[in-house]
Image (tube, rainbow, N blue to C red):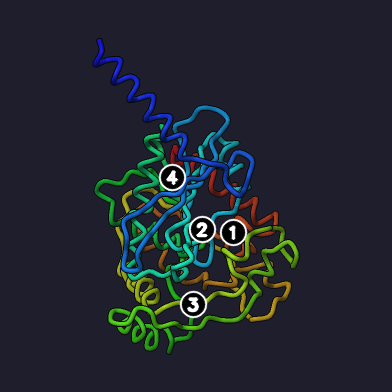
Amino acid sequence: MKQSIFLFLFFVLSVVCVKAQYSMDVLGGRFEMQTLNMPDDYDGKVITTIIRREARVPTHKAILYVHGYNDYFFQSQLAQIFNDSCYNFYAVDLRKYGRSLMASQTAFQVHNLNEYFADIDTTLSIMKSEGNTEIILMGHSTGGLITALYCNERRNNLSVKGLILNSPFLDMNQSWIKEKILIPVVSFLGLFSPNIKIKQSKSTAYAESLLIDHHGEWIYDTSKKFKQSPPVTSGWIRAIHRGQKKVHRGLDISCPILVMFSSQSVYGDDWTPEHQKGDAVLDVKDIEKYGKRLGPHVTEVVIPEGLHDLILSQKSAREKTYETMFEWLYSNKL
């Protein structure tokens, strides 16, 4: 009897402790967050941050969203729409990004994309402990590359039912000489000297297409998602290059995959109205080409005039993106 009481009290205290780890997120409302200490890496202390917004009705279905490069989770409408469709919504700010970036760290630094797998594994474990048994993984841009590699690595014991990719970063959008010569050289150097900094474009055109005080509809923290892309490191180049080479050779992801991308890419450092009608970051032809190599169950859908982050597009493209996702979820009984 005493043992039963002890076990019951232990269970209650465990639940309370788990609940207490969440606090109100900067997004406010029903958004909650918790910061998790991860094992130290080559730069020292590492944390990852889970953001949660639960549906108002009990459900065992959930979405886990993974952001892109120079990014963090702020897309509150995405969470609200999934909640309204009876999915709990979770997002993770990966190590050295957004809420998880520490003052002592180089933003976005990584040597191998599998470093992020621990962040995803930990988040999925917490989601399952909270009663989510049918989980869909969703990745945007670099998050799309990471989640694809994750699902391939875990394919024999995959704990997610499906993968949604929003403009996944499956290939560099550079000139032939950069892609075939310079990037492989920098990637090789990154093995020995991972901290060499490589400047990026000074263009703010994509940010201007998103931000409400320019030409977009959205508000976000530009100290977490910079208007100009900051320098990347040779270690980052190596991690991306090696990950993309795996995709190019072909993956064997076991779950259904939805790959969405814009109808066109747009170019130019200065904002033009065309920047509201296409992907200003990636070559959509690359996404179409390499998306087919992710596994045997791939559905590719073109979103007319979608931005790089499709869910931040103008209304018509945004609505088409949501319609596509829910039709795919329904058709796959997810």
According to the picture, the residue beneath numbered tag 3 turns out to be 173
Q: Along the line of sight, which residue is nearer the eye, 213 or 14?
A: 14
Q: What's the distance in space between the residues labelled 3 and 2, CA to CA? A: 16 Å
SS at circle 2: strand
Query: Where does the image place residue 223, in percent across and percent down from the top left?
Result: 60, 65
Q: Amino acid at mark 3?
A: Asn
Where does the C terminus fall, quadrant-wise? top left
Going 41% across and 32% down the picture, which residue do you hit? 131
| Residue at image mark 4 | 136
Secondary structure at numbered mark 1 = helix
Residue 131 falls left or right of residue 114 = right
Quarter of the rendering containing residue 189: bottom left
Q: Which of the two discs, 4 and 1, labels the residue nearer the N terminus? A: 4
User: How many numbered marks have been drawn onto this rendered protein structure?
Assistant: 4
Tag 2 residue: 166
Circle 4 packing at 10 Å, graded few (<14), some (14-19), many (20+), is many
Cβ–Cβ under 8 Å for marks 3 and 4? no
Residue 63 is marked as none
Pointer 1: what residue?
310
Relative image position of residue 304 (x, y in whole percent): 63, 61
Is residue 165 visible in the rendered structure shown here? no
Please tell me which residue is depicted at 68% across the width and 67% down the height of the picture: 209
Q: CA distance from mark 4 to mark 1?
A: 18 Å
In the image, taking residue 239 as reference, residue 311 lies left or right, namely right
